[in-house]
Structures are given as C-alpha cells and as structure tokens.
Amino acid sequence: MAGDEASSQRLTRRAKFNRDQEAGHVKLVADYFADEPVRHGPV
C-alpha cells in the first residue's frame, strides 16, 4: 500500500511565465471588436 500512495502523489512542475494579462486582454478585445477584426490564419 505504501508504494501505491507514493506513486499517486507524484509532483508535477509547471513552467511559470510572467505575462501582462491586463494588456493581453485589452489587445484581444480591441482586435476582436475592431471594424476590421484581426484574424490569424485561415478561418
């Protein structure tokens, strides 16, 4: 049983990226609701 508990509690590490989330949101909304919406790639 001890081996089962150890394997189920594995730690996972995630990369942390510092992003300016507010500026990203503002840009996304501005691009989406623009007179000519910005699209990347085929639609």
Image: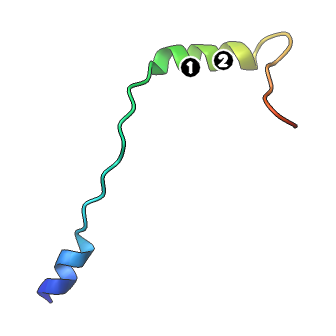
- Spatial separation of the CA atoms under disc 2 and disc 1: 6 Å
Residue 23 is left or right of residue 30, and the answer is: left
Question: Under tag 2, what secondary structure?
Answer: helix
Residue drawn at x 24%, y 77% as measured from the top left: 7
Q: State the image quarter where residue 35 is shown.
A: top right
Q: Is residue 18 above or below residue 27?
A: below
Q: Is residue 24 above or below residue 17?
A: above
Residue labelled with disc 1: 25
Q: Is residue 10 above or below residue 22?
A: below
Q: Are marks 2 and 1 in contact (CB under 8 Å)?
A: yes
Q: Is residue 35 above or below residue 1?
A: above
Q: Where is residue 25 shown, x and y percent of the image?
A: 56, 20
Q: Where is residue 16 shown, x and y percent of the image?
A: 35, 37
Q: Where is residue 5 shown, x and y percent of the image?
A: 18, 79
Near-viewer residue (7 or 32)? 7
**Which image quadrant: the C terminus?**
top right
Judged from this view, the residue extending furthest toward the left is 2
Residue 40 is left or right of residue 14, and the answer is: right
Question: Under tag 1, what secondary structure?
Answer: helix
Instruction: Count neighbours of disc 1 (C-alpha within 10 A) and say few if under 14, some if 14 to 19, many if 20 or more.
Output: few
Residue drawn at x 55%, y 19% as measured from the top left: 24
Residue drawn at x 74%, y 20% as measured from the top left: 32
Residue type for callout 1: His
Residue drawn at x 72%, y 16% as measured from the top left: 31
Residue type for callout 2: Val
Q: Where is residue 14 shown, x and y percent of the image?
A: 35, 47
Judged from this view, the residue extending furthest toward the bottom is 1
Instruction: Count neighbours of disc 2 (C-alpha within 10 A) and say few if under 14, some if 14 to 19, many if 20 or more.
Output: few
Return the mark for residue 29.
2
The mark tally for this picture is 2
**Which image quadrant: the N terminus?**
bottom left
Judged from this view, the residue extending furthest toward the top is 35
